[in-house]
Image (cartoon, rainbow, N blue to C red):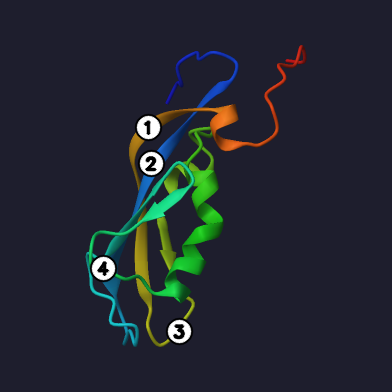
Amino acid sequence: MTMPTLPDDQFQLYDLQVTVERIEGHCTCDMQVGDHFFLRGGKLSLPPGQSFCLYALQAAIPLLPAKQRPSHPADWMETDSRVTCPDPACRLIMRIQRVGLRTLRHDDVSPIPWEPSDQG
């Protein structure tokens, strides 16, 4: 996907939805197929009244910043979208989906002031 040209201090990130796609074992955290959370910018949110297993969450977290950013179409980050809970008895499989695109400004997400670079 080609990203639009933006002012130098702006960039775009995909919003993500991480959804429990299937459970092939026994989940002791009472997760259900369809449970999900969202990542919008740097903020994680859950639907009202829903919880999400910490262990399943920690398995997904390292992949999320990379999934928020566009990469080369052949990069595995563009084609692979599933991650599993580390509990071998649970075998909970989650799907990471890009569900939107947002534009952010550097100074809204960093305490270090934006200083444009002449480097390409």
| 49 in relation to 109, above or below | below
Q: Going 76% across and 11% down the picture, which residue do you hit?
A: 118
Q: Going 56% across and 36% down the picture, which residue do you hit?
A: 109
Q: Going 54% across and 32% down the picture, which residue do you hit?
A: 108
Q: What amino acid is found at the position of numbered circle 2 in the picture?
A: Asp
Q: What amino acid is found at the position of numbered circle 3 in the picture?
A: Pro
Verify CB contact (< 8 Å) between mark 4 and mark 1. Answer: no
| Sequence-first disc among 4 and 1 | 4
| Sequence-first disc among 4 and 3 | 4
| Sequence-first disc among 4 and 2 | 2
* Camera-side mark, 4 or 1: 4
Mark 3 neighbour density, 10 Å: few (under 14) some (14–19) many (20 or more): few
> Looking at the figure, which quarter contains the C terminus?
top right
Give the spatial CA distance, label 4 vs label 3. 23 Å
| 36 in relation to 52, above or below | above
| 95 in relation to 51, above or below | above
- Give SS at disc 4: loop
| Sequence-first disc among 2 and 3 | 2
Give the spatial CA distance, label 2 vs label 1. 6 Å
Quadrant of residue 31 within the rendered picture: bottom left
Residue that badge 2 annotates: 15
* Camera-side mark, 4 or 2: 4
